[in-house]
Image (cartoon, helix red, strand yellow):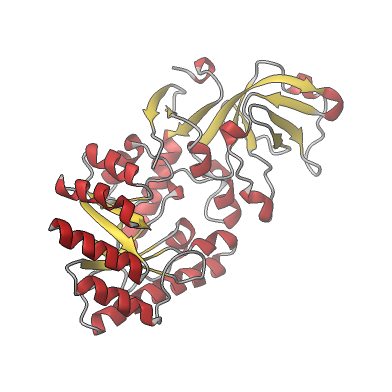
Amino acid sequence: MKLEQIDTPAALIDIARMQKNIARMQARMNTLGVAFRPHVKTTKSIDVVRAQLAAGARGITVSTLKEAEAFFAAGVTDILYAVGIVPSKLPRALALRRQGCDLKLVVDNPTAAAALAAFGDQHGERFEAWIEIDTDGHRSGIQPEQQTLLDVGRILHENGVTVGGVMTHAGSSYELNTPDALAALAEQERAGCVRAAERLRAAGIACPAVSVGSTPTALAARDLQGVTEVRAGVYVLFDLVMRNVGVCALDDIALSVLTTVIGHQEDKGWAILDAGWMALSRDRGTSRQSHDFGYGQPCLLNGTLLPGYVVSGANQEHGILAAVADGEPAGDIAQRFPIGMKLRILPNHACATGAQFPEYHAVAADGSSTEWPRFYGW
């Protein structure tokens, strides 16, 4: 199917850009001498994950048990569920492990650790748990020097749970935008996670894996001594937030939303699109960055950027295309963007925009496309 034939709105993946992004990240991990475990929450698509594994990725990271179930059913066995486990979800985790899935769970507090140990003892299952480390104060985890780290480690180790490793995510990297700042945070992330592993080992608790990563720190790290693997997710498609962080260019962004011009408000200089926030998502992450892209950066159907314009507003099913204040003059908006014209919109946040669609249209170099399913749910 050609782009002109696809009903809008639709999510497009530029295959060539995606493959370039995959190759870039995998080559960097190979150079740094660490394994790479991509986070598949960005795409939730087995077609994309197969390309990542074919390039050399070892295992995957998921953010929901449904992802774990779907990718295990598709043949992926080495899976890290990188969200703190709670007792109500343990039966599903047990079912996956009993089917042969090498599922690793995450804890960051004594209560969760004790519940996991008790459930495993009750069901005769030796779970593997990784301890989440907080290396930047961004979200969850135990700080490397806290006593709680050893408390959690001992609860697991002494009650039949394998301590498989430690993991961290420097999510505050999204707030940075210079190479030196990103490199400094990557080192902070590395050093903190390695230190946590060293403390556990000194206490007699095996801790083989040291897992770090975010897309910005993965691409900025200069040395990963003591790290065994890196995780990153949005790199596979990139987005406008990552462009502002400074780790990709606009022409690296592989995801876009195909939309059609459906009307005009000529006195306001608006073209009305059939892609509102239900297609583009409500994510306005670039509004807090150096360059605000509104709800997305428009391009022509062939991918050529329209730098003087943004999607300035969005309702549920309507998007507003308008000239930016410091861009090119709008001219005759109806003449420039006639009704029926199709455009592509680069997204602020690839994960959020992808989540609006049941499938991607994967676009080849010749303009033809095939459908790649994605899935929803937790």
The N terminus lies in quadrant: top left
Kindly tell me whether residue 228 is visible in this rendering: no
Kindly tell me whether residue 236 is visible in this rendering: yes
Q: Quadrant of residue 72?
A: top left
Residue nearest the viewer, comparing 178 with 123: 123
Residue nearest the viewer, comparing 200 with 97: 97
Tell me if 115 is positioned left or right of 134 in this view: left
Residue name at image x 40 percent, y 78 percent: 144
Residue name at image x 12 percent, y 58 percent: 124
199 in relation to 244, above or below: below
Q: Quadrant of residue 200?
A: bottom left
Residue name at image x 53 percent, y 51 percent: 248
192 in relation to 325, above or below: below
213 in relation to 277, above or below: below
Residue name at image x 25 percent, y 49 percent: 91
Residue 80 image position (x, y, % from top left): 30, 55
